[in-house]
Amino acid sequence: VQLQASGGGLVQAGESLRLSCAASGNIFRINVMAWYRQRPGNERELVADMSSGGTTNYADSVQGRFSVSRDNAKNKYTMYLQMNSLKPEDTGVYYCNLRFTRYNFWGQGTQVTVSS
């Protein structure tokens, strides 16, 4: 399984960014894709996730500002994270994650920097 994240960048507070994560390989059809982030000086934390069935979960800090969506295909899934009204505290490295059964996969991080 491979995960490829993209879409990070430098924006000003109040602006938007859209992250993408493309997952390919031998992926069980029942799975959960997620975005985590690691902010400077903090541990990695869950931002949002979405199951293959469409159930979503958001961190309180991003509720109402961020939204996730997915495109599902056999052995290829793409997850998007639409980030609106970005704040400087959203700055960090964002990681894509995919898990199913006992497996847990991570993509490379993509940097998001929000200037004030």
Image (tube, rainbow, N blue to C red):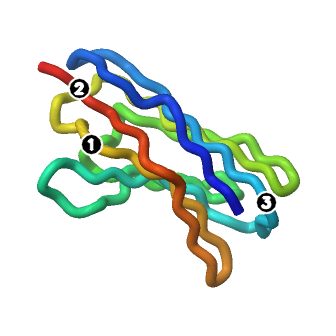
Q: Mark 1 belongs to which amino acid? A: Gly
Of the image marks 2 and 1, the number of the one nearer the N terminus? 1
Q: Give the camera-side residue of 106 and 78.
A: 106
Where does the N terminus fall, quadrant-wise? bottom right
Of the image marks 2 and 3, the number of the one nearer the N terminus? 3
Q: Mark 3 belongs to which amino acid? A: Gly
Q: CA distance from mark 3 to mark 1?
A: 28 Å
Residue wearing tag 3: 25
Front label number (2 vs 3)? 3
Q: CA distance from mark 2 to mark 3?
A: 33 Å
Of the image marks 3 and 1, the number of the one nearer the N terminus? 3
Q: Are marks 2 and 3 in contact (CB under 8 Å)?
A: no
The structure residue drawn at horizontal position 42% and vertical position 24%, both measured from the top left corner, is: 17
Residue 111 in percent (x, y) is at: 35, 37
The quarter of the displayed image where residue 51 is located: bottom right
Residue wearing tag 2: 114
Q: Is residue 30 above or below residue 55?
A: below
Residue 61 in percent (x, y) is at: 24, 45
Residue wearing tag 1: 92
Q: CA distance from mark 2 to mark 1?
A: 9 Å
Q: Secondary structure at mark 1?
A: strand
Q: Is residue 45 above or below residue 79?
A: below
Is residue 102 shown left or right of residue 86?
A: right
Q: Mark 2 belongs to which amino acid? A: Val
Q: Are marks 3 and 1 in contact (CB under 8 Å)?
A: no
Q: What is the crowding at mark 3: few (fewer than 14 residues within 10 Å), some, or many (at least 20)? A: few
Q: What is the crowding at mark 1: few (fewer than 14 residues within 10 Å), some, or many (at least 20)? A: many
The structure residue drawn at horizontal position 68% and vertical position 43%, both measured from the top left corner, is: 78
Q: Secondary structure at mark 3?
A: loop
Q: Residue furthest bottom?
A: 102
Q: What is the crowding at mark 2: few (fewer than 14 residues within 10 Å), some, or many (at least 20)? A: many
Where does the C terminus fall, quadrant-wise? top left
